[in-house]
Image (cartoon, grey):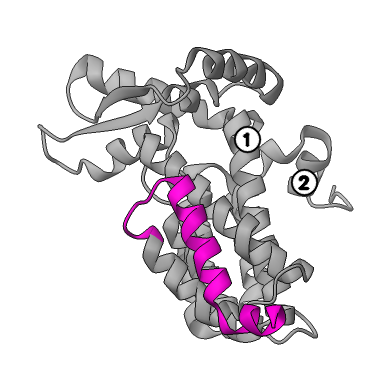
């Protein structure tokens, strides 16, 4: 007897997204690929494989859904989509304990001595908990000044107990999507894409610099959190006010200087002062003040 609906679809309906298999994301990629530039389609294919290994097919579908904002029926994909696609893949595979453990298992190869040491913040470990619980603990850690306390984790793909320890950490990827860290990272990606859309509407020549601002957010532990804070300073003090109309600044001229300044690794307060100085000296702002 033939069922009127594909059995795999019935599994999704009654057992939820967790029952999905890679074919779901692969089929969605096949549907989207004709609307992408060839280079972007190749990037998306690699990203889908990466994200399914990192999390699950649902996570790859989220990636494709974000790309579909810019490409699809009756849409002309922008030239900067080829710059968004690889950065979106990298940012969605942020470094957390299960991700670091997975990387140790994959990248170790055949080396018996291959090991990975990652220095994360205490708040990164707490971030694996559900948001409501993690928020309370993070507030307490903040009061104690322990949020950025570095915690070293050692992962190894070879050797008895070390390998079992590493594999135990990888199992946490199944609950990652319900964690506080996942919520924060998803919010960051959405804000980045939102700023790209806004700048594309008002100053198209500057949009590529907003896309590439994602490169500022990298690393792990204290360095990572510092880079995220700097990125938010750039958005809050420069990009968003310009989009809102409270600043009149040529972002195409100012943003490259700001991004170069961040490369030197300034403190957040120093970066804010640098941005204010550049804004005051920009030709558009001087013209408005006159």
Lateral position of residue 240 relative to residue 154, left or right = right
Q: Residues within 10 Å of mark 1 (few under 14, many from 20)?
A: some
Indicate yes or no whether the magenta region holds residue 265. Answer: yes
Q: Is residue 21 visible?
A: no
Which residues are drawn in magenta?
262-290
| In-front residue for pair 260/95 | 260
Secondary structure beneath disc 1? Answer: helix
Image: 179 above or below 79: above
Q: Circle 1 sits on which residue?
A: 177
User: Can you give x and y, in whole percent of width and height, for residue 199 in the image?
Assistant: 68, 74
Q: Nearer the viewer, mark 1 or mark 2?
A: 1
Q: Give the mark nearer the N terminus: 1 vs 2.
A: 2
In the image, farthest residue toward the front:
290
Lateral position of residue 258 relative to residue 243, left or right = left
Q: Circle 2 sits on which residue?
A: 7
The residue lying at 62 percent from left, 35 percent from top is 177
User: Can you give x and y, in whole percent of width and height, for residue 29 in the image?
Assistant: 62, 67
Instruction: Tell me how far mark 1 sits from mark 2, CA to CA.
Output: 26 Å
The residue lying at 89 percent from left, 53 percent from top is 4
Lateral position of residue 32 relative to residue 263, left or right = right
């Amino acid at each position: 007897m033939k069922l009127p609906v594909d059995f795999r679809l019935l599994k999704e309906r009654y057992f939820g997204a967790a029952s999905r298999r890679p074919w779901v994301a692969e089929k969605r990629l096949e549907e989207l690929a004709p609307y992408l530039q060839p280079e972007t389609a190749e990037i998306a294919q690699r990203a889908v494989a990466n994200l399914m290994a990192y999390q699950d097919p649902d996570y790859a579908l989220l990636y494709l859904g974000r790309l579909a904002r810019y490409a699809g029926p009756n849409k002309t994909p922008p030239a900067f989509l080829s710059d968004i696609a690889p950065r979106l893949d990298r940012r969605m595979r942020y470094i957390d304990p299960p991700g670091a453990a997975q990387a140790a298992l994959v990248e170790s190869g055949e080396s018996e001595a291959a090991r990975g040491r990652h220095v994360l913040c205490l708040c990164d470990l707490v971030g694996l908990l559900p948001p409501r619980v993690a928020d309370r603990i993070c507030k307490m850690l903040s009061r104690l000044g322990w949020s950025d306390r570095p915690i070293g984790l050692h992962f190894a793909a070879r050797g008895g107990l070390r390998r079992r320890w590493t594999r135990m950490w990888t199992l946490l990827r199944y609950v990652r999507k319900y964690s506080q860290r996942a919520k924060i990272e998803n919010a960051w990606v959405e804000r980045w894409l939102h700023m790209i859309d806004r700048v594309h509407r008002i100053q198209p020549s500057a949009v590529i610099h907003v896309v590439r601002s994602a490169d500022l957010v990298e690393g792990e532990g204290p360095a990572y959190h510092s880079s995220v804070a700097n990125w938010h300073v750039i958005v809050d003090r420069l990009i968003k006010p310009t989009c809102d109309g409270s600043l009149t600044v040529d972002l195409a001229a100012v943003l490259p200087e700001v991004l170069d300044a961040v490369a030197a690794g300034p403190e957040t307060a120093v970066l804010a002062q640098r941005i204010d100085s550049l804004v005051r000296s920009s030709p558009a702002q001087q013209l408005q003040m006159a």
